[in-house]
Amino acid sequence: MNDSTTAEAQAKFTKGSLFGHISVMSLTASIGLMAVFLVDFVDMIFISMLGKAELAAAVGYAGAILFFTTSFGIGMAIAAGALVARALGAGEVEEARRRATNSLIYGVIFGAIFAGVVWFNLAFLASLLGATGDTLDLAVHYLQIIVPSLPFLMIGMIGGAILRAHGDARRAMMATIWGGLINAVLDPILIFGLDLELTGAALASVCARIAIAITALLPLIRHYGGFDKPTPNSLTIDLRPILAIAVPAVLTQLATPIGQAYVTRAMAEYGEEAVAGMAIVARMTPVGFGIIFALSGAIGPIIGQNAGAGLNDRVRNAFREGLLFTGIVVIVVSGLFFLARPGIQWLFQLEDGIALTIVFLFAGPLSLMFFFNGVIFVANAAFNNLGHPFYSTIVNWGRHTLGTIPFVLVGAAWFGAPGVLIGQYLGGAVFALVAFLLARRVLANQGRETKPAEPFARQARLFSLLHHRR
């Protein structure tokens, strides 16, 4: 099979039903994501069963910091997926393989540096969130074990993004499923069997990350030509286009945990029970809305391949179908959350109090507001794959600063601890509208601003100028 035939086979999203592609990609990707998120959910159940509020609160604080480190990996994965998908859409198989190789190398290097910086500042970061005393010590101990494994998570996330860029959602899904299964098996053994409590949960997570890395790399080697031998020249060629997307994408992703950190700090004013309630909501959200979380990574390759092939009508239609898909999923999941309220209360052994109030608030009317998060996810995928990654940065930082702080302050003043979540979601709705309008503008101009093969020319020129000035 020659390269042109191979490229045509791999650029599978340039033909067929867009809604079908979005549904298959999102559902398969979400199964993998939910396998991991479900284990986090079970972790919280196990920790709640230990009957120690400080342990549940420690997991809540640690979760905010882990979200921070994971967001760095998501940003690098976005860059890899966008570059590989566009190369495949343009029929450049060799270029796609080279970019996949270099994205993984840079991901590991940058991930190790970032993990080191975070590891040496864990106590400071956890205290910023409001953790004190024994809860602070427990959160730091938990994080000291998990954070050094970030490079393995980076390999898994970037490998999964490359697989999705090839349209292989199933194998990307299986990588995370294997990680989730290993975590699920090790959790009860380490937490209860060996009586390691938080230490056991952390060790299980590290093993899961290693498994995800291995199972994401193997299909790329077996089915997609593996990787090129890196050379200084090839690494130099791809550094600028990778940074052109990765820098704004990482900045975009880091906005979310920083905004969430402020929300955690605001909730800490109402005590450890309130933080524990928010931690439960934080575990419920990705389990219920894993499909929406997966949508951004799933629709990105679809937009990228069609943009690379110059099929601008299909790009615009993919954006519209993504919003429709988001609305359907949110309505269904919100209804299920509401019906599952008694079971959720029993699972987490929640008595009447602020934790139960917060969980029930989310498992009902507030979860419908997640639609606006989905709008931002779909818009960001369009920005990242159409040469405007800094638009994602602007939207996310606006959403998690101007769209979070004043809304949370007002919500807390009016409604107390529940108002913290209400304010957070109302601010998200405002910036979802901003994201939607910006995306409409980008889509309207698609095909007139740049050539299909040069989607990130302006960003690359910017990094080139900065390089020469140094």
Image: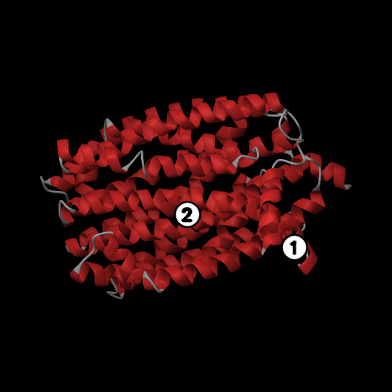
Res. 390 in view: yes
Res. 279 in view: no
Q: Which residue is mark 1?
A: 236
Marks 2 & 1, CB-CB < 8 Å contact: no
Residue at point 17% right, 64% down? 52
The image position of residue 443, as x and y in percent, is 62, 27
Residue at far front of view? 469
Q: Amino acid at mark 2?
A: Ser
Q: Is residue 424 left or right of residue 269?
A: right
Residue at point 59% right, 49% down? 78
Res 298 → quadrant: top right
Q: Is residue 458 left or right of residue 325?
A: right
Res 441 → quadrant: top right
Residue at point 30% right, 72% down? 193
The image position of residue 293, as x and y in percent, is 47, 42
Res 345 → quadrant: top left
| Image: 258 above or below 112 | above
Asked which secondary structure carries label 2, the reply is: helix
The image position of residue 420, as x and y in percent, is 23, 42
Q: Which residue is mark 2?
A: 71
Dot placed on the residue nearer the N-terminal end, 2 or 1: 2
Q: Nearer the viewer, residue 463 or 415?
A: 463
Q: How is the image coloured?
A: secondary structure
**Quadrant location of the C terminus?**
bottom right
Between label 2 and label 1, give the one nearer the viewer. Answer: 1
Asked which secondary structure carries label 1, the reply is: helix
Task: Specify few, some or many for label 2: CA neighbours under 10 Å numbering under 14, 14-19, or 20 or more.
Answer: many
Residue at point 36% right, 65% down? 187
